């Protein structure tokens, strides 16, 4: 792919809460311009465009995909539409940043990756956690052996939401449940630091709608490292993470996936409190990565490569097979080993 010229012109597909957060973050992104939005209704698109000063408002997803003034599309629709919407935009010649989870299963994601490679277009999962300054600094410190060899980590993400069978969190038809919505964060955190698991044990308590209301995942990685992870939609947890090494530990005490601080505690030394604040909500960092890649002519991010997204999806497929959890919109055989 040839390098593109600045500014990179963005469109947003979807007008929900996550789309609004992304739009707010765009003010911090260099060499980029947010120009267009697409929704299933013209009224929703018009309201979003007016709120964020966009030049174009489209009353269908197809119209946004065909907008000649858009270079790259951020897909912010419900989980069940990610596969379909990504293919729509890729076939229209648009680069894509798709909200997590990238797809419902590995079969869908494989088709998305193949389409991007066939059309020689950029594609990335919006795993914004990977681009947060504290997480980048954490990786640097581990690479520098500041706490020795990492042997174990813990991470959890849970909150108490009111039970509403029709909401996206609890609706089986919308691929609701803790795993795909928030369990993906501790899993992605563990796999970022320790790689693909060699063995997985998991348990889930299901809501009356059939989705996982709360769940836990125990991973054994290639060198014997252990990850102890959990997520919940009806239980408030600490939302923190610990990384344990042979010579110390690192604690991300608050909302580890978007952390602004961490405590580095080498063994027999005073703890170091690291603060790396940032403006805005943090979504700008993933958007900046997309812009930088497009300006450099890349079709894939080195920080969030497609292979890592495929590995994460395979892991979540395996976890759901252990529970017997299949979404009605999935095709027969999508979750087969």
Image (spheres, rainbow, N blue to C red):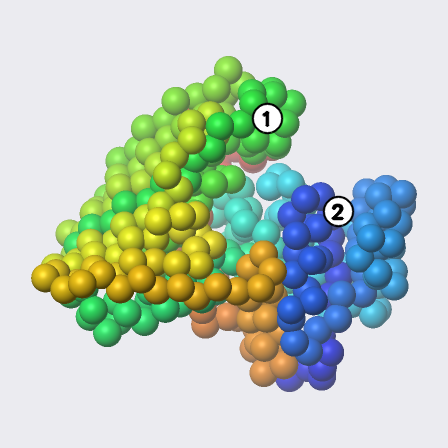
Q: Name the residue under label 2.
A: 15
Q: Residue 300 carries which label?
A: none
**Of 77 and 282, which appears nearest the observer?**
282
**Of 315 and 29, which appears nearest the observer?**
29
Which image quarter is the C terminus in? top left
Contact (CB < 8 A) between labels 2 and 1?
no
**Residue in view at x 28 percent, y 45 percent:** 154
Q: In this view, does 126 lie above or below 35?
A: above
Q: Can residue 185 be seen in this view?
A: yes
Q: In this view, does 12 lie above or below 326?
A: below
Q: How many labels does the image show?
A: 2
Q: Is residue 174 above or below residue 285?
A: above
Q: Which mark is residue 171?
A: 1
**Residue in view at x 12 percent, y 61 percent:** 267
Query: Neighbour class for label 1 at 10 Å: few (<14), some, many (≥20)?
Result: some
Q: In this view, does 239 lie to the left or right of 217?
A: right
Image spot of residue 275 (x, y percent):
40, 64
| Sequence order check, earlier mark of 2 and 1 | 2
Q: Is residue 316 left or right of residue 295?
A: left
Q: What element carries label 1?
A: loop
Q: Is mark 2 on a helix, strand or loop?
A: loop
Q: How far is the residue under mark 2 from the one under mark 1? A: 20 Å
């Amino acid at each position: 792919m040839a390098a593109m010229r600045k500014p990179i012109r963005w469109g947003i597909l979807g007008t929900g809460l996550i789309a609004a957060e992304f739009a707010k973050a765009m003010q911090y992104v260099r060499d980029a311009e947010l120009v267009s939005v697409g929704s299933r209704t013209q009224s929703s698109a018009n309201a979003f465009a007016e709120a964020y000063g966009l030049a174009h408002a489209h009353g269908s997803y197809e119209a946004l995909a065909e907008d000649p003034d858009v270079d790259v599309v951020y897909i912010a629709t419900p989980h069940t539409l990610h596969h379909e919407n990504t293919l729509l935009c890729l076939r229209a010649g648009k680069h894509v940043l798709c909200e997590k989870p990238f797809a419902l299963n590995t079969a869908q994601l494989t088709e998305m990756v193949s389409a991007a490679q066939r059309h020689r277009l950029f594609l990335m999962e919006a795993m914004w956690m990977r681009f947060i300054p504290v997480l980048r600094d954490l990786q640097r410190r581990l690479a520098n052996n500041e706490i020795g060899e990492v042997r174990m980590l813990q991470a959890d993400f849970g909150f108490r939401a009111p039970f509403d069978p029709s909401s996206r969190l609890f609706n089986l038809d919308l691929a609701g449940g803790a795993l795909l919505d928030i369990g993906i964060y501790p899993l992605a955190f563990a796999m970022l630091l320790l790689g693909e698991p060699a063995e997985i044990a998991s348990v889930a308590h299901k809501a009356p709608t059939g989705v996982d209301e709360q769940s836990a995942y125990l991973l054994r990685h290639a060198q014997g490292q252990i990850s102890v992870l959990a997520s919940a939609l009806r239980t408030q947890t600490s939302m923190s993470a610990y990384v344990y090494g042979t010579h110390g530990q690192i604690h991300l005490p608050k909302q580890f996936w978007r952390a602004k601080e961490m405590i580095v505690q080498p063994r027999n030394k005073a703890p170091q409190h690291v603060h790396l604040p940032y403006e805005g909500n943090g979504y700008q960092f993933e958007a900046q990565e997309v812009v930088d890649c497009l300006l450099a002519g890349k079709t894939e991010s080195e920080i969030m490569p497609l292979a890592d997204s495929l590995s994460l999806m395979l892991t979540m497929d395996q976890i759901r097979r252990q529970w017997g959890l299949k979404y009605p919109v999935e095709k027969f055989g999508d979750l087969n080993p």
